[in-house]
Image (spheres, rainbow, N blue to C red):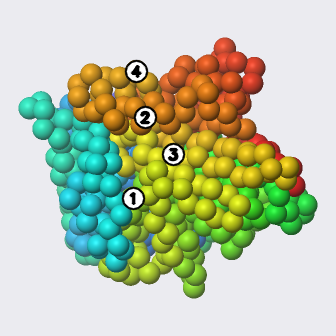
Amino acid sequence: MGSEFTAITEYPLMEGAVLYSTSLGGLLIGCPPEVLKTLLTKHYPMPNTVVIPGTMTRFSSSQACLEFPFYHFLFIQQGLAQGKKFRVLGKKKVLEDLKEMLRVTLLGPAYEEAMGSETQLGLKPNLSSKKVQAICDEAAHLALKGKDGSILQVEQLVEFIPLEVGEKQSVYPSVGEQPEVLIERLGEDSFRCYAGKETYTTILGAANPQVPIYPMSANPVTAQEKNSAQAFSIRLLGTSEGFDPTKPANGSLIRVDGKWYLWDCPAYLRQHLKAIGLDFSDIEGIFVSHVHEDHLDIIETIEKGKKVKIFSSPEIFHCMLLKLKANLGCSYKEAQAHYDFHPFYAGKPLKLGKAQFEVFYSVHAIPALGLKLHVEGPNGETKGLYISGDQLSKANVAKLVASKVINKPRAQEIEAFLTPDDLYDAILVDSGGGLIHGDPADYAAQPSPVYYLHTGKKLKEIPKHHHNCLPGDHIVILEA
């Protein structure tokens, strides 16, 4: 006897998200932080369609974390190769803002937009046109291209479908035994799916904070460290990447000159801080390397009643505001009002107490920064920390040089980021591989301690003074 055909299978995922799987694809309602990692861990079908709820933020978390479900569709599900579009349903105004958010996270800002960011932010012009032109050229070369060689824009990759309260939209057509699948928006956060005689109602309540699918490791802060102005250390809150379901992505807590600074802001930041015995109010400021979602959970960077200090380059901060604007449904100026912005320019050191911070533009798919941090030790010696940021491998940089995307001065600048003669007490590097991330082999000759990040893989055959990093690792440069 044959079994009755089931048009939809329901998969509850986590607070604020449910997946409806059909023979034509998966419909994800709600898109909280790192929902892709939950899908991967549970071995559930992958979505090709996402519905954005009316309540866009809950418990310091965005509910429109589209990037990695989108990237998975493009590259793992082969949507890009098959010429298919990812689909996003939501309110018309929300979709307009999300389109801008995806534009700057996928392509980065255009050159004119980047150079105009200081004026838009009310800053005096200090950006180097040569540097900005260089990183925009690199981003354009690394951007996804169509068959004719032109850069694929967001609207060529994503279909944005308006869905207001009281409206109904067709999601999948009827094919064979599969009846047409429709979705109706009953309210801000309530929806009903229809497929033939089957109906499913979803109410996206999130009474409790969302939690990650992976275990959260912690190395608690000691009272001595918390009270010490001498301590110089770095705690790795996250060490992996957006497709690794076993560990949190990037974010590091730097203790220097009696203050805590965050380098990048991971999802579930406040839960990370609570696990090590700190509160968000303990953070002096956040350094934002770039706006990819596995480095920046935008809602975690704001605090009610407080202007949070942000250190970044103006064009990166501009992109950050577009992300916040999309999530809060506010104006650009209202987004800017959440922050106390401290512009930070590549090649121009910034002195904060006894610590000297210097950033440089790494080579990445969008504007991104790396960091050189130096502190004077108790005996007058200089102690140093190097963070590569997201950085192409030397082999891929060489290809850009050969194709004349990177000119000779920029090539020399990149080569000088970190040489074997540069001695640091800790060197943290992107070892994610692929087209836009680093190759561990590039650092094999470094005599200083090297810590490999941004990968779900455990690297083998590395020098004894080099280290595979795990979330919660505490790298001490100066004792408290």
Mark 4 surroundings within 10 Å by alpha-carbon count, few (fewer than 14), some (14 through 19), many (20 or more): few
Q: Earlier in the sequence, mark 1 or mark 2?
A: 1
**The N terminus, quarter of image:** top left
| Front position in the image: 57 or 322 | 322
Q: Distance between the residues labelled 3 and 4?
A: 19 Å
- Gap in angstroms between the C-alphas marked 2 and 4: 12 Å
The residue to which callout 4 is attached is 395
Where 242 falls versus 265 (above or below)? above
Which tag is nearer the camera, tag 3 or tag 2? Answer: 2
The residue identified by callout 2 is 414
Which element is circle 4 on?
A: helix
Residue 14 in picture, x, y percent from top left: 55, 55
Query: Of the residues shown, which amino acid type is indicated by label 3?
Result: Gly
Mark 2 or 4 closer to N-term?
A: 4
Q: In this view, does 115 lie to the left or right of 469?
A: left
Q: In which quarter of the image is residue 467?
A: top right
Q: Which one is nearer the viewer's eye here, 122 or 460?
A: 122
Q: Mark 3 points at which residue?
A: 370
Q: Between marks 3 and 2, how big is the CA–CA gap?
A: 11 Å
Rendered location of residue 395, percent (x, y): 40, 21
Residue holding disc 1: 316
Q: Which amino acid does label 4 sit on?
A: Ala
Contact between marks 3 and 2 (CB within 8 A): the answer is: no
